[in-house]
Image (spheres, helix red, strand yellow):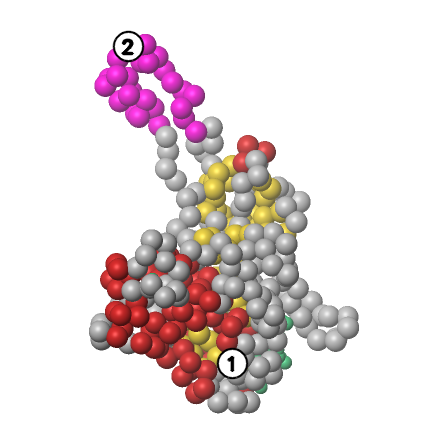
């Protein structure tokens, strides 16, 4: 933990004599003894926070005001950090975030929200059948990932029910990493192992439509989770998770797998039906297409890259980039507009 000791103040005094040389203890942050923590879960104003190797329940200090604290946030935390039952610590500071995944208000949720902070990868989980894949929802998740600067990963489940090829063909121009899994591989553990290799050393957010098999996969990746959330649904009688917010789970170490000693985090999110994208800026999305970026030099100011004067048509016509890349970019950008089928 960084300390804000006397030394800094003394330096200040020496270089800037005069009036301002009186001791300025007030410039020191109030909570210099705060511990560092990571937010694992948010539930009705209570935050589950990892501090060293303990989980501590905390609330926001009043001084944070309306500042949001979300899963993945690194925070400074004070108070009772024992993690004992019925104790409540206080979050006094949120550290700068390396990334922010958000969704705009939409039918599922009337508020714009930051879903997760500090993630590096977005795993878009899609079933190849039951439920049918919804390419527009996949596109919307990809746009959110590109906008937030997260690396996307396609996880296609239920390949025992339908082939992956048609969908993979659609996404081939994007050159995304992908993993295809089926029921037998899930049962054998090999599906989770292949996904695990992609997660090594990363913080990965899992998103997917309800029913695609996200819970099955996350439980296989983090067996601890199945135990922690093994409540039984009274209607179906099946064990069901009750995630209403994102939940960060540490990946168990797997020295037998490539990169398996690196650890990593899985952040599970509730099933999504849509993914609001009004906040997305096309100029950030296009950064995921470095082969097209130089072609935008001749574009009109604040070009949507899908208008008659867009210079990208000429860029690909002159052979600087694959036309399918431009087609894919435009499809993604158009996914920002709301469509009925979303
Ligand atoms: N055939 C087949 N079924 C699978 C596969 N993966 C998961 N399932 C089944 O699909 C159903 C839905 O899986 P879940 O893991 O509950 O799906 P989910 O995405 O978490 O859905 P929510 O819990 O509604 O968010 C379950 O009955 C799983 O057993 C697969 O690869 N093949
Ligand atoms: Zn353009």
Figure quadrant, ligand 1: bottom right
Q: Is residue 166 magenta?
A: no
Q: Is residue 342 left or right of residue 3?
A: right
Along the line of sight, the residue nearer the viewer: 278 or 254: 278
Mark 1 lies within 8 Å of ligand 1 (Cβ measured): yes
Q: Nearer the viewer, residue 321 or 262?
A: 321
- Residue at left offset 64%, top offset 61%: 107
Image quarter where the C terminus lies is bottom right
Q: Residue at coordinates 43% horizontally, 43% vertically from top-left?
A: 95
18 magenta-colored: yes
Q: Which residue is mark 2?
A: 18
3D distance between C-alphas at marks 2 and 1? 69 Å
Image coords of residue 270 (percent x, y): 60, 64
Rendering quarter of residue 175: bottom left
The crowding category of the residue bearing disc 1, from other C-alpha atoms within 10 Å (few below 14, some 14 to 19, many at least 20), is many
The main secondary structure of the magenta stretch is: helix
Q: Which mark is residue 157?
A: 1
Q: What's drawn in magenta, residue-wise?
A: 5-29
199 vs 134, nearest the viewer: 134
Residue 204: tell me if it is visible: no
Density class for disc 2 (Cα within 10 Å; few <14, some 14-19, many ≥20) is: few
């Amino acid at each position: 933990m960084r300390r804000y000791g006397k030394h800094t103040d003394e330096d200040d005094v020496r270089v800037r004599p005069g009036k301002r040389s009186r001791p300025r203890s007030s410039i020191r942050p109030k909570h210099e003894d705060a511990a560092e923590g990571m937010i694992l879960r948010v539930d009705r104003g209570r935050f589950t926070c990892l501090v060293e190797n303990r989980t501590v329940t905390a609330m926001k200090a009043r001084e944070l005001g309306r500042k949001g604290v979300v899963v993945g946030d690194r925070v400074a935390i004070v108070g009772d950090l024992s993690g004992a039952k019925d104790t409540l610590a206080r979050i006094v500071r949120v550290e700068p975030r390396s990334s922010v995944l958000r969704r705009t208000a939409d039918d599922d949720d009337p508020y714009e929200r930051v879903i997760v902070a500090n993630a590096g990868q977005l795993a878009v989980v899609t079933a190849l059948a039951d439920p049918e894949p919804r390419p527009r929802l996949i596109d919307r998740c990809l746009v959110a990932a590109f906008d937030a600067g997260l690396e996307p990963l396609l996880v296609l489940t239920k390949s025992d029910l339908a082939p992956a090829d048609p969908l993979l063909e659609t996404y081939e121009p994007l050159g995304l990493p992908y993993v295809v899994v089926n029921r037998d591989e899930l049962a054998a553990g090999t599906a989770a192992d292949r996904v695990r290799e992609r997660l090594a050393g990363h913080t990965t957010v899992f998103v997917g439509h309800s029913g695609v098999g996200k819970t099955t996969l996350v439980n296989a990746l983090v067996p601890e989770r199945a135990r922690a959330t093994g409540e039984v649904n009274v209607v179906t009688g099946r064990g069901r998770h009750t995630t209403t917010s994102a939940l960060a789970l540490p990946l168990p170490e797997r020295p037998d797998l490539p990169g398996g000693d690196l650890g990593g985090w899985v952040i599970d999110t509730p099933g999504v039906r849509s993914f609001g994208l009004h906040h997305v800026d096309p100029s950030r999305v296009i950064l995921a297409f470095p082969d097209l970026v130089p072609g935008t030099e001749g574009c009109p100011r604040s070009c949507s890259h899908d208008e008659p004067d867009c210079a990208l048509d000429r860029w690909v016509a002159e052979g600087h980039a694959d036309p399918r890349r431009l087609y894919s970019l435009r499809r993604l950008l158009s996914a920002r507009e709301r469509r009925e089928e979303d």
